[in-house]
Image (cartoon, rainbow, N blue to C red):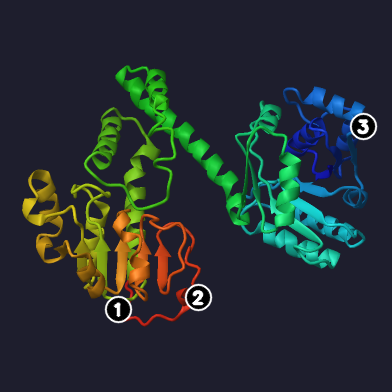
Amino acid sequence: MKISIFGLGYVGCVGSACFAELGHDVIGVDVSTTKVDLINSGRPTIIERDIDELCRRGHESGRLRATTDARSAVLATDVSFIAVGTPGTGHGHLDLSYIYGVARQIGEALRDKDSFHVVAIRSTVMPGTNEKVASIIEEASGKKRGEGFAVVSNPEFLREGTSVKDFLNPPLTLVGTDCQRAAEVMHELYGSLPAEYISTDIRVAEIMKYVNNTYHALKIVFGNEVGAICKTLGIDSHKVMDIFCRDRHLNISPYYFKPGFAYGGSCLPKDTRALRALAADNYVDVPVISHIESSNDAHRHRAVELILAQGRRKIGVLGLSFKAGTDDLRCSPIVDVVETLLGKGCAISIYDKNVQVSRLTGTNHEFIMSKIPHLQHFVTDDLDAVMAASDVIVVTNAEKEFKDLPARYPGKIFVDLVRLWDELDYEGRYEGLAWANINQNDAQNAEMEKDFAKSAF
């Protein structure tokens, strides 16, 4: 395939050399004549393992060259990658002027091109950039997105020092697009790589690099804080983290990495506080570990605000225990939510088949009595009674018996705290706690009458 890559810095140079190595014809584009001359002499623009050999082979095979002429590069290729810099500002925002400048150059070139062209944003950008780039190209080219051209988001996941290896052996290939034709072109382009090819929503692809890198930063900080605590106790932190990483069922797995409700139960709240106290006792400053609980509290507050925002007084809560399949109420986050809603004057009905108030004992009983001493007046094992009595249905546990409730009870307002449904076509309002709206039914947009004024939390 014929490819042009705008920007011959770190990402652009690696991409140019690796695509040429994969057998594609590559034209690098840059305003710097120095970088263009380096590529045209078979040398890289960066210092990186293995990049020298790939640039040399690409040059000798005739598959890799560079130019300062953006128009000729676009007209001679099928796909244009945007890999220019997106420098940060002092406040954490990005300067996207280089991205938009390249988009306009590509658009002006496309005005004189008849064939379909794919523009792939490789640079790290915020959600919404793809749409802006497409509008600039439409304006400059006079062509319509999805017909004369397509803009896809194709974030890179390269580590400095191993970027060539990472490009040729990636964990996955991610392309965000709303155009099937572009998806097929990109799939063909990356088809020889030994990795899963994932085609997804544009805005999902745009945010992935930020999620990845922030998590990588979090892992480093968490490991260092554990190390600082271990050092004061004379414990080998590398042995601790080595064992930690061997658990692939929970510690290194997708199990906990799904946005949902706040954590609770008898273990996580108690043990995170204990580790924080251990650090404090040994005068070790651990900001990340110290703020885990406050972050969890903030998520619980978001749930309260979301429920109150529906403007209805009669609220049904499906699940009181801290997770499905148990009667453990200790530190259950929904208990605090119910306590707050009661204080706001809401009429609460609770269904939980696993919780029988008369049988609660020990710390379980003590906890719930300290929060909702008259719990027996709110809890029932009659699901239909709770549904009939409530305007807002708050789903807090992922029980299978709740799956068909939207079909059985149209017109209710569902507030989903656990992502019980992957998608919905529901004749009523649906709100997810920490994900975009998944309800495809037009009734979602109908004006809802409110009988309960929202108040500040």
The spot of residue 89 in percent (x, y) is 64, 50
Q: Give the class, few, some or many, for how many residues have Cα within 10 Å of label 3's Cα (few <14, many ≥20).
A: some
The quadrant of the picture occupied by the N terminus is: top right
Label 2 crowding class (10 Å Cα cut-off): few <14, some 14-19, many 20+? few
Label 1 SS: loop
Give the alpha-carbon distance from disc 2 to disc 3, as whole Å. 55 Å
Specify whether 405 is left or right of 338.
Answer: right
Is residue 349 rendered to the left or right of residue 136? left
Query: Of the numbered discs in the image, which one, if any, rests on residue 154?
Result: none
Q: Nearer the viewer, mark 2 or mark 1?
A: 2
Q: Residue at x 43, y 35 (%)?
A: 253
From what the image shows, is residue 12 above or below residue 414? Answer: above
**Disc 1 residue type (three-letter):** Phe
The nearer-to-camera label among 2 and 3 is: 2
- Residue that label 2 marks: 442
Identified by mark 3, the residue type is: Gly
Mark 1, residues whose alpha carbon is within 10 Å: few (<14), some, or many (≥20)? Answer: some
Q: Position of residue 386 (x, y in %)?
A: 22, 69
Which residue is identified by label 3?
62
